[in-house]
Image: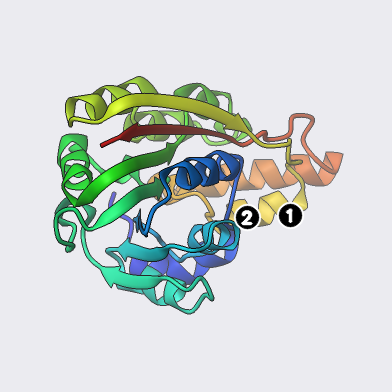
């Protein structure tokens, strides 16, 4: 199933806040690179762009986004970034024109990582490329997998394993390839979380059958209403993979 991000941009923007457990490590890697120009790939509605720009200043920030609906949302935010509509597999920038590249939860939209990483290598003068994703173990442990039978299967099929990302980054010519897993403080699965699920704040919910989503949401809401919150909170887990040119 294809997700129409132009159509869901407003809802997506409302339910997906910027930042996360990865942000401190991402800022640290950017600071070490001393970049003049930073490129964010698949910048979405700019919530992560804004979170990044508030913590890291002094560089020109470019944001590439394919969906015009998402881009319009992002361009309204006071991040100071320049927005470009385009495809990360054909980055519309000159070779050697940026010093730091990052993406946040976009790798699972890419079927051919070798093409993406080749483009990143091309546009980097020298510097670092960082990709924020998640781990298969977190997907499988996620509390929502108990309410939506296809939740884990959908996401383990589309999110590449961290070892695969690291391997393909090395094969694209990046060196000192490394990774880290960052975990946020636990968040309760309460009525506020149910509202986010209802708004399909994770694209996973767009990809499952509607009857499964409706049924799972009803069971989740019933359990939360009866208990106040589920016994098991969500401890958001991010994985960063990076390499140098």
Q: Is residue 113 above or below residue 192?
A: above
Task: Identify residue for label 1.
Answer: 192
Is residue 205 toward the left or the right of residue 172 in the image?
Answer: right
Label 2 crowding class (10 Å Cα cut-off): few <14, some 14-19, many 20+?
some
Q: Is residue 27 above or below residue 147?
A: below
Which picture quadrant has residue 237? top right
Separation of disc 1 and disc 2 at Cα?
A: 7 Å
Labels 1 & 2 near each other (Cβ < 8 A): yes
Task: Identify residue for label 2.
Answer: 196
Q: Nearer the viewer, residue 136 or 210?
A: 136
Q: Which mark is residue 153?
A: none
Q: Is residue 189 above or below residue 17?
A: above
Q: Report x, y in % for residue 91.
A: 19, 57
Q: Report x, y in % for residue 197.
A: 60, 51
Is residue 148 toward the left or the right of residue 35 in the image?
Answer: right
- Who's the residue at 43% across and 76% down the image? 75
- Who's the residue at 49% across and 31% down the image? 149
């Amino acid at each position: 199933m294809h997700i129409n991000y132009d159509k869901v941009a407003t809802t997506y923007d409302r339910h997906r806040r910027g930042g996360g457990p990865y942000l401190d490590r991402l800022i640290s890697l950017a600071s070490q690179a001393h970049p003049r120009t930073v490129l964010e790939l698949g910048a979405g509605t700019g919530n992560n762009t804004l979170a990044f720009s508030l913590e890291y200043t002094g560089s020109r920030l470019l944001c590439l986004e394919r969906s015009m609906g998402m881009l319009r949302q992002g361009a309204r935010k006071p991040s100071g970034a320049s927005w470009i509509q385009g495809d990360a597999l054909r980055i519309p920038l000159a070779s050697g024109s940026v010093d730091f590249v990052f993406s946040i939860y976009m790798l699972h939209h890419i079927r051919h990582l070798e093409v993406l990483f080749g483009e990143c290598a091309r546009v980097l003068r020298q510097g670092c490329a960082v990709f924020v994703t998640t781990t298969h173990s977190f997907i499988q442990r996620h509390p929502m997998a108990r309410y939506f039978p296809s939740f884990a299967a959908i996401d383990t099929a589309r999110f590449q394993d961290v070892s695969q990302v690291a391997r393909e980054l090395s094969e694209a010519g990046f060196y000192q390839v490394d990774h880290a897993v960052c975990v946020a403080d636990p968040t309760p699965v309460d009525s506020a979380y149910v509202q986010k699920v209802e708004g399909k704040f994770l694209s996973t919910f767009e990809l499952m059958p509607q009857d499964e989503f409706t049924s799972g949401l009803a069971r989740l809401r019933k359990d939360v209403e009866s208990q106040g919150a589920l016994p098991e909170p969500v401890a958001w887990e991010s994985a960063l993979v990076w390499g140098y040119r």
